Amino acid sequence: MASIVSVVVTDDIDGSKNAQTVQFGVDGMTYEIDLAEKNRAKLDKAMAPYLQAARRVSRRPSRTGTRSNAVRSDRAAVRTWAREQGLPVSERGRISADIMQRYEAAH
Protein backbone atom coordinates (compact mmCIF):
# COMPACT_ATOMS: atom_id res chain seq x y z
CA MET A 1 0.00 0.00 0.00
CA ALA A 2 1.27 3.48 -0.88
CA SER A 3 1.28 6.39 1.50
CA ILE A 4 0.54 9.96 0.60
CA VAL A 5 2.10 12.60 2.81
CA SER A 6 0.79 16.15 2.67
CA VAL A 7 2.71 19.11 4.01
CA VAL A 8 0.53 22.00 5.07
CA VAL A 9 2.37 25.27 5.63
CA THR A 10 0.56 27.48 8.09
CA ASP A 11 1.03 31.14 8.91
CA ASP A 12 3.50 31.64 11.77
CA ILE A 13 1.48 34.59 13.10
CA ASP A 14 -2.12 33.34 13.15
CA GLY A 15 -1.96 29.71 12.00
CA SER A 16 -3.98 30.26 8.82
CA LYS A 17 -3.45 27.88 5.89
CA ASN A 18 -1.80 28.35 2.50
CA ALA A 19 1.18 30.26 3.82
CA GLN A 20 4.38 30.81 1.87
CA THR A 21 7.88 31.30 3.19
CA VAL A 22 9.17 34.88 3.13
CA GLN A 23 12.83 35.78 3.65
CA PHE A 24 14.06 39.16 4.79
CA GLY A 25 17.19 40.63 6.32
CA VAL A 26 17.90 43.09 9.11
CA ASP A 27 21.25 44.06 10.62
CA GLY A 28 23.18 41.47 8.63
CA MET A 29 20.92 38.59 9.64
CA THR A 30 18.56 36.74 7.30
CA TYR A 31 15.18 35.64 8.64
CA GLU A 32 12.40 33.37 7.35
CA ILE A 33 8.74 33.39 8.25
CA ASP A 34 5.72 31.57 6.81
CA LEU A 35 2.91 34.02 6.03
CA ALA A 36 -0.53 33.67 4.47
CA GLU A 37 -1.80 36.32 2.07
CA LYS A 38 -3.29 38.63 4.75
CA ASN A 39 -0.15 38.79 6.90
CA ARG A 40 2.12 38.97 3.83
CA ALA A 41 0.19 42.08 2.77
CA LYS A 42 0.67 43.58 6.25
CA LEU A 43 4.41 42.91 6.10
CA ASP A 44 4.67 44.38 2.59
CA LYS A 45 2.75 47.50 3.67
CA ALA A 46 4.90 47.97 6.78
CA MET A 47 8.16 47.51 4.84
CA ALA A 48 7.18 49.59 1.78
CA PRO A 49 8.52 53.00 2.92
CA TYR A 50 11.82 51.44 4.01
CA LEU A 51 12.24 49.45 0.81
CA GLN A 52 11.49 52.50 -1.32
CA ALA A 53 14.18 54.52 0.46
CA ALA A 54 16.72 51.68 0.65
CA ARG A 55 19.28 50.61 -1.93
CA ARG A 56 19.88 47.01 -2.92
CA VAL A 57 23.24 45.44 -2.27
CA SER A 58 24.72 42.23 -3.53
CA ARG A 59 25.57 39.43 -1.16
CA ARG A 60 28.70 39.83 0.90
CA PRO A 61 31.80 38.26 -0.58
CA SER A 62 33.03 35.13 1.08
CA ARG A 63 35.93 35.36 3.50
CA THR A 64 38.06 33.06 1.35
CA GLY A 65 40.50 34.78 -0.94
CA THR A 66 41.13 37.79 1.25
CA ARG A 67 44.50 38.50 -0.38
CA SER A 68 44.44 40.74 -3.38
CA ASN A 69 44.36 39.07 -6.78
CA ALA A 70 47.53 40.93 -7.80
CA VAL A 71 49.55 39.37 -4.98
CA ARG A 72 47.88 36.01 -5.42
CA SER A 73 48.55 35.85 -9.15
CA ASP A 74 52.15 37.13 -9.19
CA ARG A 75 53.94 34.41 -7.27
CA ALA A 76 57.10 34.92 -9.34
CA ALA A 77 57.41 38.47 -8.01
CA VAL A 78 56.98 37.21 -4.44
CA ARG A 79 59.71 34.59 -4.95
CA THR A 80 62.08 37.15 -6.49
CA TRP A 81 61.46 39.59 -3.65
CA ALA A 82 61.98 36.86 -1.02
CA ARG A 83 65.31 35.84 -2.57
CA GLU A 84 66.44 39.48 -2.64
CA GLN A 85 65.60 39.70 1.07
CA GLY A 86 67.60 36.54 1.78
CA LEU A 87 64.51 34.56 2.73
CA PRO A 88 64.34 30.85 1.92
CA VAL A 89 61.75 30.21 -0.77
CA SER A 90 61.29 27.20 -3.04
CA GLU A 91 61.34 27.41 -6.83
CA ARG A 92 57.91 25.82 -7.09
CA GLY A 93 54.96 25.00 -4.87
CA ARG A 94 53.51 26.75 -1.88
CA ILE A 95 54.97 29.99 -0.57
CA SER A 96 54.88 30.16 3.23
CA ALA A 97 52.30 32.41 4.87
CA ASP A 98 55.12 34.24 6.66
CA ILE A 99 56.78 35.21 3.38
CA MET A 100 53.45 36.21 1.84
CA GLN A 101 52.69 38.44 4.84
CA ARG A 102 56.11 40.06 4.68
CA TYR A 103 55.73 40.66 0.92
CA GLU A 104 52.27 42.21 1.39
CA ALA A 105 53.54 44.44 4.20
CA ALA A 106 56.44 45.62 2.05
CA HIS A 107 54.22 46.45 -0.92
Image (cartoon, helix red, strand yellow):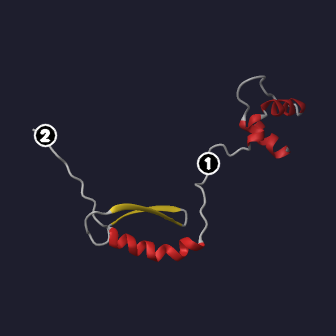
Which residue is painted at 76% across and 42% down in the image? 101
Q: Is residue 78 left or right of residue 45?
A: right
- Residue, disc 1: 63
- Tag of residue 106: none
The front one of 61 and 79 is 61
Vertical placement of 65 versus 19: above or below? above
Q: Is residue 12 left or right of residue 46?
A: left
Q: Residue 104 location in percent, x, y?
A: 80, 43
How many numbered marks have been drawn onto this rendered protein structure?
A: 2
Question: In the displayed image of the protein, which residue is found farthest to the right?
Answer: 84
Location of the C terminus (image quadrant): top right
The front one of 18 and 69 is 18
Location of the N terminus (image quadrant): top left
Which residue is painted at 59% across and 70% down in the image? 54
- Residue, disc 2: 2
Disc 2 is placed on an element classified as loop
Distance from disc 1 to disc 2, alpha carbons, whole Å, reads 47 Å
Q: Residue 29 location in percent, x, y?
A: 51, 62
Q: Is residue 65 left or right of residue 83?
A: left
